[in-house]
């Protein structure tokens, strides 16, 4: 993509309405614009990142054995009355009357609807176990939306649901999602820590929040550093191998990790040697939950067992804040000059900077490099604008692509271009255009 | 995917609420379920088709030079008041009050919001021309929603917008979209005919509807058969080549094609030789429209010209009914046994039918074939259920995958399986398992 043709309206100044760094940087980099309070339009650069994240979430859900569907945004109030949540939800639920004065709502979550769908499609134990998920926009009418996409009103969520005949089977589904979450966040370049969470009236130990470490996080976090140093990404993980799943869960839940809500200082000190005690802040990016027959009973989602009993289905739900993750990744990965994207979600792999478009040789060299990168399937944003070198460097640092390939008349005379890494130690090297291409294509 | 594990709740009977064939078949094949009037959940099989269509639409928009973004579903009423459409829209617009009693709405289209976004991001002629699009759910509160996804209330639409300095440039954008539409529908396996449409008060000739031929269509269609026999899909079409674009538009608009609304029988008879006169019915699947400064003036979307004037931007909009197309394709491509998917949008490429799962050799052969197809990247739905051969054939015909690979004990004794084409002349041949794989992978 040529930046001269790209719709990426950057801002030089920090917008004063933005209180946290991800909100500031997303506005400045031209990733999003507010449409109304807590509701955002995703401009091309931001939408590329959102789709990358969505795709990684999807791949890991598919690998774990869940099937994708799509429920609508607008729901009838009827099911929510049956489950008892229509009144519970309060003003956070966006309630709507249609032209025939039927009570509708913009779904804040989908337990009721998925239960109805499954109830009508599955009748027997032979239809279980099963897992379904969707990635869809939700609406929660927050009283004071803020922090950009971190706490918006219209937000993109992946919500998965599991359907099992009994607790043991439901627990295995829960554990597969547990591992899927660890792997998903790791693939997104994040270190996400599973923390025991409240299960409400159901009890048990099957509820975890996944928290990403970031200074600006809303929760205080206490955990064992050992987990931070642990790499969860084994190649070719097999979700069908129950023992392998159990092993990952056992390890991850053996180490102390609590938010301030459930923190126990005495146990922290007893369980974790002093030099391994980590205290910081974190952002919730996922939540998984086994809730048994909470919805299947009132909504009548029943199946017949092998011995011809009729029993309610055991269910769980598993949420990831997909749009929130865009902000979460920025909170966890930026410096004073802008965003530093992990490779897996970067909107482009490399930014090609033409330092002097008025110089015919320089522009010819850039056009050639651009053509070669496009040809090789490397996603490249080519800054071919008529701007100063300083402005171009500032833009590239702001939008945070993993690599910058800088081409200027002086270097070209010596047969070299500069290849610069964004983030890490910001390593830079001068090398021939051919060597630079070889490195970026590899 | 193994059908025994897939969530595909088929129906044996025709649901009585379904008046047209696409609605009947989508319900029966377990592609969608109604959530409330005119609002559907897309089950896994249906969602695969929807995403395929969406991706083809996207690829052709990208190739034509448009950039993808995503606007939210919920909009503030303010912009609609500025454009004057808030009152015009009537009860079809789903109006919402949020918790602070602000007037909001579920977007039925996005001219106002995209104009605001562009106004704030582009100031100069150097920022033009530009094209932006998104693929997002819309809501129109139809008084009597029916025909399944063909006339739903919540529906998925691709809407693109063009931004140009003057009429001539806007016309070139329009023509690129014209070609993109022809190519998109052709890639979807459809014959879509561009028909002149009303331009409203703006006048001119820059408004076309794209109509797919189907007996159940809502419009009567009169056109020259020559267009029906013409193949619009040249490989590697270059949208940047204005002459090539012009040539396609000129040819396509030279032939008579009108819906009943604009039909002129005398001209039809004068322009089209009798044997080439086609009269039938059709479904609107796309609409493209140049509307000049209709929104840029009231909303103040202005740019400076090279000679420092300030002028309103010339705009056009280009819509494709993405979810409607799922129904439209079925209306155009089915028989008495079910759907016949074009290859490009089929949810799976091949259905593998195990005729006798109790037979160990048969099941071993099926498992081997399934593994080989998956390994080769062929999308295969493996009917490994404990059902009769008749039920399995009926399911496969109903869901309409392009190929059926049928494996039974009797054939295997002779070293053969049966490969059957869905649609066309339904050709079938017996061949060795190896030859069948070779044919499906090719």
Image: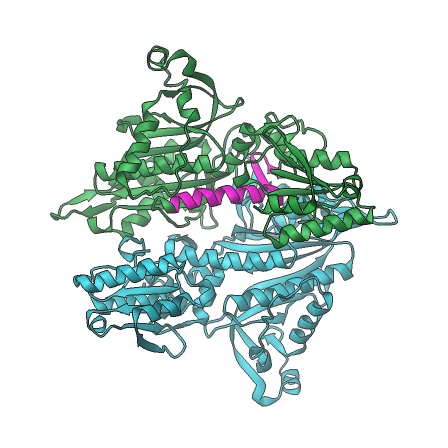
Chain colours: A cyan, B green
Near-viewer residue (A105 or B378): B378
- Residue at the spot x=49%, y=23% of the render? B218
Instruction: Give how far across and how far down residue A425 sits, in percent.
Output: 38, 79
Q: Is residue B424 left or right of residue B353?
A: left
> Could you tell me which quadrant the N terminus of chain A lies in?
bottom left
Stretch of the chain drawn in magenta:
B35-62
Q: Quadrant of residue A105?
A: top right
Q: Is residue B240 left or right of residue A196?
A: left
Near-viewer residue (B219 or B178): B178
- Residue at the spot x=24%, y=72% of the render? A415
Q: Can I make out residue A102 in this image?
A: no
Instruction: Give how far across and how far down residue B434 sits, in percent.
Output: 67, 47
The question of residue A435 being in magenta is answered with no
The answer to whether residue B103 is above or below residue B206 is below
Q: Is residue A382 left or right of residue A302?
A: left
Near-viewer residue (B397 or A337): B397
Q: Is residue B60 left or right of residue B22?
A: left
């Amino acid at each position: 993509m040529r930046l001269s043709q790209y719709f990426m309206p950057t801002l030089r100044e920090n917008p004063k309405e933005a209180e946290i760094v991800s909100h500031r940087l997303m506005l400045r980099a031209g990733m999003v614009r507010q449409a109304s309070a807590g509701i955002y339009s995703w401009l091309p650069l931001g939408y590329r990142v959102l789709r990358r994240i969505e795709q990684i979430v999807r791949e890991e859900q598919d690998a774990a054995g869940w099937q994708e569907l799509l429920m609508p945004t607008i729901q009838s109030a009827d099911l929510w009355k049956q489950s008892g949540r229509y009144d519970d939800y309060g003003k956070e639920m966006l309630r709507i009357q249609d032209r025939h004065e039927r009570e509708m709502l913009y779904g804040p979550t989908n337990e009721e609807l998925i239960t109805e769908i499954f109830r009508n499609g599955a009748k027997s134990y032979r239809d279980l176990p099963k897992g379904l998920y969707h990635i869809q926009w939700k609406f929660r009418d927050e009283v004071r939306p803020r922090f950009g996409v971190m706490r918006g009103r219209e937000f993109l969520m992946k919500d998965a649901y599991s359907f099992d005949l009994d607790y043991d089977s439901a627990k295995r589904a829960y554990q597969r999602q547990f591992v899927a979450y660890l792997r998903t966040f790791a693939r997104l370049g994040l270190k996400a820590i599973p923390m025991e969470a409240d299960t409400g009236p159901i009890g048990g130990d099957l509820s975890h929040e996944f928290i990403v470490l970031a200074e600006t996080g809303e929760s205080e976090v206490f955990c064992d550093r050992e987990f931070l140093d642990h790499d969860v990404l084994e190649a070719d993980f097999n979700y069908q191998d129950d023992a392998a799943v159990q092993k990952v869960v056992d390890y991850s839940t053996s180490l102390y990790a609590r938010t301030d809500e459930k923190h126990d200082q005495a146990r922290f000190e007893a369980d974790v040697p002093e030099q391994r005690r980590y205290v910081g802040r974190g952002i919730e990016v996922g939540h998984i939950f086994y809730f048994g027959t909470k919805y299947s009973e009132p909504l009548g989602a029943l199946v017949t067992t092998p011995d011809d009993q009729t029993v309610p289905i055991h269910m769980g739900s598993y949420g990831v804040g997909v749009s929130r993750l865009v902000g979460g990744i920025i909170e966890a990965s930026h410096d004073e000059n802008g965003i530093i994207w992990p490779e897996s979600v970067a909107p482009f792999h490399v930014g090609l900077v033409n330092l002097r478009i008025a110089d015919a040789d320089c522009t010819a060299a850039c056009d050639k490099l651009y053509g070669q990168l496009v040809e090789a399937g490397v996603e490249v944003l080519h800054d071919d604008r008529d701007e100063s070198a300083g402005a171009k460097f500032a833009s590239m640092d702001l939008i945070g692509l993993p690599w910058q390939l800088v081409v200027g008349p002086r270097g070209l005379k010596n047969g070299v271009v500069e290849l610069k890494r964004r983030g890490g130690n910001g390593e830079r090297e001068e090398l021939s255009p051919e060597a630079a291409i070889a490195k970026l294509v590899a």
